[in-house]
Image (spheres, grey):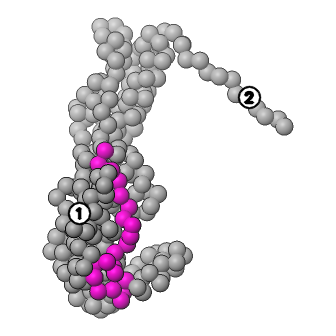
Amino acid sequence: MMRTTVRDVMTAQVTSVMADTLFKDVAEVLVANGISAVPVVDGDEQVLGVVSEGDLMRKEEFREQYCGESYQPPLRARLRRRMTGQVEGGRRKAAGDTAADLMTAPAVTVAPSASTARAARIMDECGVKRLIVVDAEGRLQGIVSRRDLLRMYLRDDDEIRRRVVEGIPSHARWNDRDGIIVEVHNGIVTLSGHTGKRSEAAAAVRTAEGLDGIVDVRRALTWQEDDVLELPVIWDRS
């Protein structure tokens, strides 16, 4: 069963800046390209860090030019910085003049071969909206965002059904009288029908649940032989 990887959904053509890129030039890159962050790389394309709009907005010059003089970060962002001790770092970035001064380092990265599920977990654990994709040597390969991951859920029902069916062993699929019937509606997979063994039904459910872009899996399966050994639960009364 093929899993969707970061390489399949990432943006490969990525704008980057060098460590010595000046503040205004970084700002122009973000605004001109309509992006919210840019990787900082060295001469070998190795990723040093990331500069985001949030990093730049700590400088009054950027606020006035692009956001208006009355701009201030949302209350939640200000509270988070205080709770995580980011206030001093913010002051340093506010005084910075180059990408090296402004960037957050190290960047949160992921390998292009990683699954999209792993990318989503890293984003959630690190509280970021995007990951920098790097190869084994740390060189820039692309960027993957939350929006890229959400695109998996835009697959049409026919494609999802095809992927589920391909993952179920042929002997367990639907035939004239018995077998597993796969139906998909709005991304929700329903497995129904009858199998010879309970393990076959369980394997089909795992196949569907393991596919990327599935909203939910509903099961209405029956089986002739229960070949799944369920170990008894032993309670420790000590």
Amino acid, disc 2: Ile
Looking at the image, tell me whether mark 1 or mark 2 is earlier in sequence order.
1
**Which residues lie in the magenta part?**
93-113
Q: Tell me the residue that label 2 is attached to.
A: 234
Question: Which residue corresponds to the image point at 25% horizontal and 28% vertical from the top-left?
Answer: 162
Locate residue 63: give its quadrant.
Answer: bottom left
**Chief SS of the magenta region:** loop
**Is there any visible trace of residue 53 in the rendered image?**
no
Q: Give the numbered dot on residue 45.
A: 1
Amino acid, disc 1: Glu
Question: Which residue corresponds to the image point at 55% horizontal and 17% vertical from the top-left?
Answer: 228
The mark lying in front, picked from 1 and 2, is 1
**Is there any visible trace of residue 39 in the rendered image?**
yes
Q: Is residue 17 above or below residue 232?
A: below
Residue 40 image point, x, y percent: 27, 70
Q: Secondary structure at mark 1?
A: loop
Report whether 71 appears left or right of 195.
Answer: left
Question: Which residue corresponds to the image point at 35% horizontal and 44% vertical from the top-left?
Answer: 115
Q: Indicate yes or no whether the magenta region holds residue 107.
A: yes
Q: Residues within 10 Å of mark 2 (few under 14, many from 20)?
A: few
Q: Nearer the viewer, residue 196 or 89?
A: 89
